[in-house]
Amino acid sequence: MNETSSPKPRFTIITGLSGAGRSECAKCLEDLGYFVIDNLPPALIEKMAELVTVPGSKVKQVALVVDARGGEFFPELEKSLAQLEERGVEHRILFLEARERTLVRRFVQTRRRHPLADNDRIIEGILEERAIMSPLREQADVIIDTSDLNVHELRDKISSLFAEQHPGSGMAVNVISFGYKHGLPLDADVVLDCRFLPNPHWVEELRPLNGTNRKVRGYVLNAPETEPFLSKVRGLISTMLPGFVREGRHYLTIAVGCTGGKHRSVVISDEIARYVKEKGFGSTVVHRDLDKE
C-alpha cells in the first residue's frame, strides 16, 4: 500500500465530568499506542486533523482530551467534528462520568478544586458541569461510569474497548457480568437477566465458589432452562451484531445480571463472549462483582 492510499487516522475525543478519570484514560490510550493531546481546545481539532492526515504521516490513532470549561465549547466542538467528517476522518466520543458522591469524595481526597465550583462548593460545580455536558453525553459512542472502578479496573476496561485486536470485525463487544444488588452497569447497551436460572448460592457445596469454577459452570449449564435461554441469546446476537456494525457502531456492551454477580451471570457471560468470538467479533469479559460480598 502506498502512502497516499494509507488509512486516515481515527480520532477519539475523551471528555466527560471532571474527576471521572479523563487523565487516566488518556494515559491508558497512550500506552496502547495512541497519539494523545491533553486539554486541547475544540477549535484546534481540525488543525490537528490537518497535521496528521498529510501524506506520509505515521499517526493512525489520535486521542484528544477536551472539557467544557470554555464558553464556546459546544459550538466549537460541533464545528470541529463536522470538519472531521468533511475530511473523511473517523471519530468517536468517549464520555466518562461518575456518581456525585463519588466525585465529591475524589475531589476531597485529592484536595483539588472543581473547575466550575464557586466558593469551594464542590457539589455545585459537579451539578453545573453535568448539566453543561448533558448534550454531549447523548452523542457519545462510549459511556463509562467509573464510580465503582479503581485505576487498574478502569485501565483494563479501556484496554478491552480500545485495543485494536480485531480490526476486521468492525466492532468490539464487551460482556459484563454483574449483580443486581450492586446496581446496573450504567454503560450497558443490552441487559440480560438470568435470575430465573437455578441459583448455585443455595447449594452449600457451591456457595463459596464462583462462576469460573468447573462445578458451578456444570450446575448452571446443565439446568434445563439454560440451553433454551442461550439458544435465544445466540439468535439475538446473530441478528443484532451485524445490524450494529451497519449502523456504524464500534463498541457494544452486553451486561448479564444475576442476584450477586458471582455465579449464574459469570457463567452465562463467558458463554456469550465465547459465542461472540465464534461470530468473528472482538470480545472481552469483565466480571464486575465477582469479589464483592
Image (cartoon, rainbow, N blue to C red):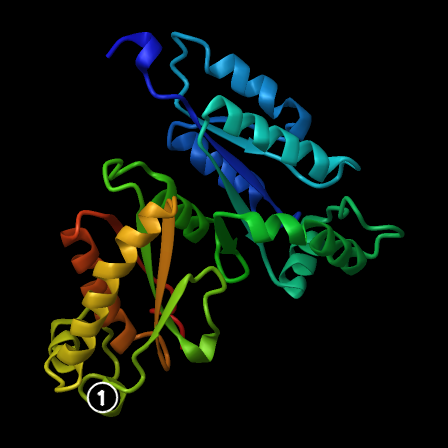
Residue lying furthest right: 119
Displayed quadrant of residue 34: top left
**Is residue 269 visible in this depiction of the protein?**
yes
Which residue is tagged 1? 198
Q: Is residue 245 above or below residue 209?
A: above
Horizontal and vertical percent position of residue 181: 45, 80
**Residue drawn at (20%, 78%) of the image:** 229
Q: Quadrant of residue 212?
A: bottom left
Indicate the quadrant containing the N terminus: top left, top right, bottom left or bottom right: top left
Task: Specify whether 101 is left or right of 263.
Answer: right
Residue 64 is situated, as x and y percent measured from the top left of the image, at: 55, 31
Question: In the rendered view, does 115 fall on the left or right side of 19?
Answer: right
Query: Is residue 271 depicted above or below 89 in this figure?
Result: below
On-image quarter of the C terminus: bottom left
Q: Residue at x 73, y 49 (%)?
A: 111
Crowding around mark 1 (Cα neighbors within 10 Å: few <14, some 14 to 19, many 20+) is some
- The answer to which of 92 and 174 lies nearer the viewer is 92
Q: Position of residue 240 (x, y in %)?
A: 29, 59
- Quick check: can you spot residue 20? no
The residue under the point 41% across, 45% down is: 158
The three-letter amino acid code for the residue at tag 1 is: Pro
Disc tally is 1
Does 12 sit left or right of 263 as displayed? right
Q: Quadrant of residue 168?
A: top left
Q: Position of residue 260 (x, y in %)?
A: 37, 79
Callout 1: SS: loop
